[in-house]
């Protein structure tokens, strides 16, 4: 694995300027439509998802943001550029502008949403070889750190890195919601797509004031073919592995999803957490500050994945008994909150402004 390291601080500043301009342009568009839909008499509200837990039978239970994904500098070895999908995830995970839908005052529809965020989480599938980092990886990390750490220290503190990059796919069709006092629910076409980053990460030992550095690439079908002892197909060997779960789901403050670990198949990419003996996703009503937890799940969920990945992870060509459960904790914001807060969640109490870019 080799890497071309970006030169100087200018590249980083250019990337961040482009990234921030994109976000500000998006939320400015949301600000423009609010005066049309959001007259003072209409009960518009903003739904912000601050934390989520997901469970897929056979696969894993994990949370977002995942504290196991270390803040650091991550470089895509194929491009020599930063890997933005591994940036530190900050809430909100999802943000929606919700408006009345029809004559019933309790019925709503999602009118707009902020850009879909990528949700990284650590995985440790069995059978993935613990290959030591090559000299080129050590050199790449040394280049990122500017020679601040001896190569021998980098070598001794660099290990294999596997991070799944998930995201909720843009919803096909309408997302509907119901709000009745403290009860709140959302019905949506829920599709969770995943790709996997793998590579190496240097974690500095005590005494070195430098950030962790990762050198990563995407997991490809050709690599998974090699892991299961199959000759890669030249037509697909460079394809990035993508897999997903897809179901229509109603998440509600009145729902719960509880499954004792003892009755569940062992998850293959990440073991159940220590210190508890059950999956416990429990909804909670909307409180006076707008905080809520909604839970939903679906059975017999379709799991789409390349055949070689099914064979590597699950030792089968098809999964047929999959449940998919989601717990989302968030806040329902008053319609007077500024939609610029979708890009800056700490600014939720600001009033609506003509343009976020004017800040």
Image: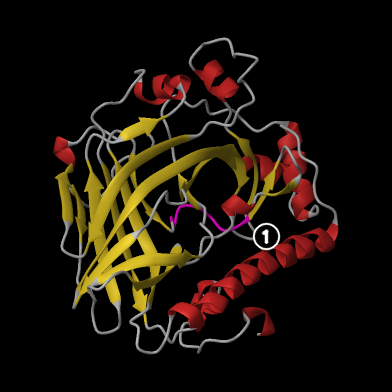
Q: Is residue 323 above or below residue 69?
A: above
Task: Let me know if residue 70 is in the magenta part.
Answer: yes
In-front residue for pair 180/70: 180
In-front residue for pair 179/160: 179
Left or right: 182 in relation to 271: left
Left or right: 277 in relation to 271: left
Q: In the rendering, at what x and y percent does residue 58 appear?
A: 29, 33
Query: Mark 1 = which residue?
Result: 210
Q: Which image quadrant: the N terminus? A: top right
Residue 161 visible in the shown view: no
Q: In the rendering, at what x and y percent does residue 352 appear?
A: 52, 86
Q: Is residue 99 above or below residue 244?
A: below
Q: Which residue: 37% across, 54% down?
A: 63
Q: Which residue: 70% across, 31% down?
A: 134
Residue closest to the far front: 103
Q: Which residue: 39% across, 65% down?
A: 110
Q: In the rendering, at what x and y percent does residue 39 appear?
A: 42, 86
In-front residue for pair 5/119: 119
Chain part drawn in magenta: 66-72
Q: Which residue: 29% across, 52% down?
A: 326
Q: Main secondary structure of the magenta part?
A: loop
Left or right: 136 in relation to 187: right
| Numbered circles on residues, count | 1
């Amino acid at each position: 694995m080799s890497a071309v390291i970006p030169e100087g601080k200018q590249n980083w500043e250019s990337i961040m300027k482009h990234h921030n301009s994109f976000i500000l342009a998006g939320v400015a568009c949301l600000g423009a439509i609010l005066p049309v839909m959001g007259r003072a008499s209409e009960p518009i509200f903003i739904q912000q998802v601050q934390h989520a837990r997901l469970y897929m039978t056979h696969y894993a239970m994990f949370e977002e943001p995942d504290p196991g994904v270390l803040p650091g500098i991550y470089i895509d070895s194929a491009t020599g550029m930063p890997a933005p999908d591994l940036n530190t995830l900050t809430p909100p995970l999802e943000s929606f502008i919700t408006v009345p839908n029809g004559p019933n005052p309790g019925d709503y529809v999602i009118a707009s949403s902020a850009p879909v965020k990528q949700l990284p989480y650590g995985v440790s599938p069995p059978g993935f070889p613990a290959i030591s980092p090559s000299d080129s990886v050590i050199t790449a990390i040394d280049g990122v750190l500017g020679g601040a750490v001896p190569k021998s220290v980098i070598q001794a503190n660099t290990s294999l890195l596997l991070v799944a990059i998930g995201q909720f796919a843009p919803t096909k069709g309408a997302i509907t919601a119901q709000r009745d006092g403290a009860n709140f629910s959302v019905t949506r076409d829920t599709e969770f797509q995943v790709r996997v980053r793998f590579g190496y990460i240097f974690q500095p030992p005590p005494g070195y004031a430098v950030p962790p550095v990762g050198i990563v690439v995407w997991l490809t079908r050709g690599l998974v073919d090699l892991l299961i002892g199959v000759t890669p197909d030249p037509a697909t060997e460079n394809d990035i592995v993508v897999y997903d779960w897809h179901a229509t789901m109603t998440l509600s403050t009145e729902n719960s999803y509880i499954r004792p670990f003892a009755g569940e198949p062992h998850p293959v990419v990440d073991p159940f957490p220590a210190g508890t003996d059950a999956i416990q996703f429990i909804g909670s009503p909307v409180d006076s500050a707008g905080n809520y937890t909604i839970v939903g799940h679906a059975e017999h969920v379709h799991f789409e994945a390349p055949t070689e990945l099914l064979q590597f992870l699950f030792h089968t060509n098809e999964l047929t008994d999959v449940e998919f459960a989601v717990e989302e904790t968030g806040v329902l914001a008053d319609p007077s909150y500024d939609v610029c807060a979708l890009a800056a969640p700490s600014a939720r109490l600001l009033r609506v402004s003509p343009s976020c870019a004017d800040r």
